[in-house]
Amino acid sequence: MVKKDRAELVTWHCGRLSELQMPHRHCPEGIGSLACRAASSRLVLAILLVVSVSFAAGCGKTNAAPATPVPEVEVASVVQRDVPIVSEWVATLDGYVNAQIQPQVTGYIIRQTYKEGSFVRKGQILFHIDPRPFQAVLDQANAQVAQAQAQLAKTAMDVDRDTPLAKERAIAQSQLDNDIQANRAAKAAVKAAEAQVEQAQLNIEFTEVKSLVDGMAGIAQVQIGNLVNPTTVLTSVSKINPIKAYFSISEQEYIHFADRINADAQKETPSNGPPFELILADGSVYPHKGTGLLANRQVDVSTGSIQIVCSFPNPQSFLRPGQFGRLRAAPEVRRGALLVPQKAVSELQGSYQVAVVGADNKVSIRAVKAGDRVGPMWIVEGGVKPGEQVVVEGLQKVQNGGMVKIKQPQAKGD
């Protein structure tokens, strides 16, 4: 209808323009006609201006931009609850007790009596050293004992014989004194010889190198026929049930938990510490929980960290010294923490913000302080209240103060 009216208007104006271009019938020839023509020109210009305005008005109505649609977003509620703060650390496993097996005498290895990598008992013989040189020393020490005992017997007889003679002044008192002194020296010689025998017997026992603890024996570091001495390491035996795990925490973390760590350090078996989970190299979680034992005496000046030790039961000897893993524990619980989905939080130049949708579906962009992450959620401080709705999908489409339409979640199976 608008297009039809516009066409009729243009036709009418064009007709009027044609009439004006013709000589006016009322204008006389000559000078008067010039005035008529000037008046006609002014009328033509006015008509053209009206036509242009009509076209502009019609075009403006036709090309008007459509209204911007209201963006559709998904929202989630701000949740408030007590949240355990979980931390992870890289850990190295080591034996609860690591005993280096070294000989106490010098000699040649003649036999190895344990299977490498097997479990051994305390006192079990692991290596034999050639005992013959030590047996010869023992025989010599026994002979010296016999000789000293013989000398002791002689001096005892001298004392017994000279004692009555000295009373009767048949001999000088000095001779009896010498006899008594010789007898005492003979007794000391006997004790010294007996000590040599005992030492020789110990050396023979030391030719059987035994395990000092119950544990897992390592690979032998020597071969049969090697000459060994007290500085030689033959093998190592580690007590691995329980097994220790070593990890480091920062100085700031230590300061935060110092009171609890120091209180547990006074106990032989700390009981109020958080349980530890051990995540193995393949991503599996070790089935037994660990407990904290102690903290090292000093902070490492090169790294600014302090070493912490915890232990894990290892009844099947599954864990071995030298393994790496990740320890996971929740050393503290954040009371009444406010949680929002991580995808609801956007970062802008080091600051964090969320888009809150009010009851009137109007968006409010608020700054928040982001804390620890708890699974898919993020602890935030300030800016939001429990139960408020925050945008989790379509965040890039919203503006502060703008209106949104909340998308209803689809039912499962749709």
Image: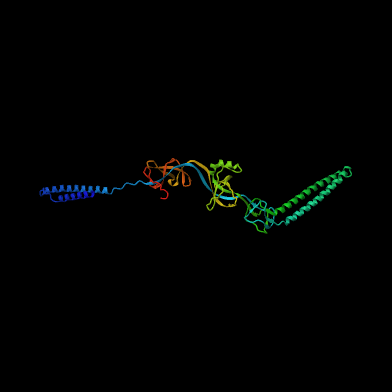
Is 86 placed left or right of 221 in the picture? left
Question: Of all residues shown, which one is farthest toward the front?
Answer: 413
User: Which image quadrant for residue 180?
Assistant: top right
Report x, y in % for residue 247: 56, 48
Report x, y in % for residue 269: 60, 43
Asked whether residue 140 is in view, the answer is: yes
User: Residue at coordinates 83% horizontally, 49% vertically from top-left?
Assistant: 153
Report x, y in % for residue 24: 12, 49
Is 376 placed left or right of 213 in the picture? left
The mark tally for this picture is 0
Image coloring type: rainbow
Depth check: give the residue in front, 72 or 43: 72
Asked whether residue 346 is in view, the answer is: no
Is 55 placed left or right of 210 in the picture? left
Q: Is residue 275 above or below residue 232?
A: above
Report x, y in % for residue 217: 63, 54
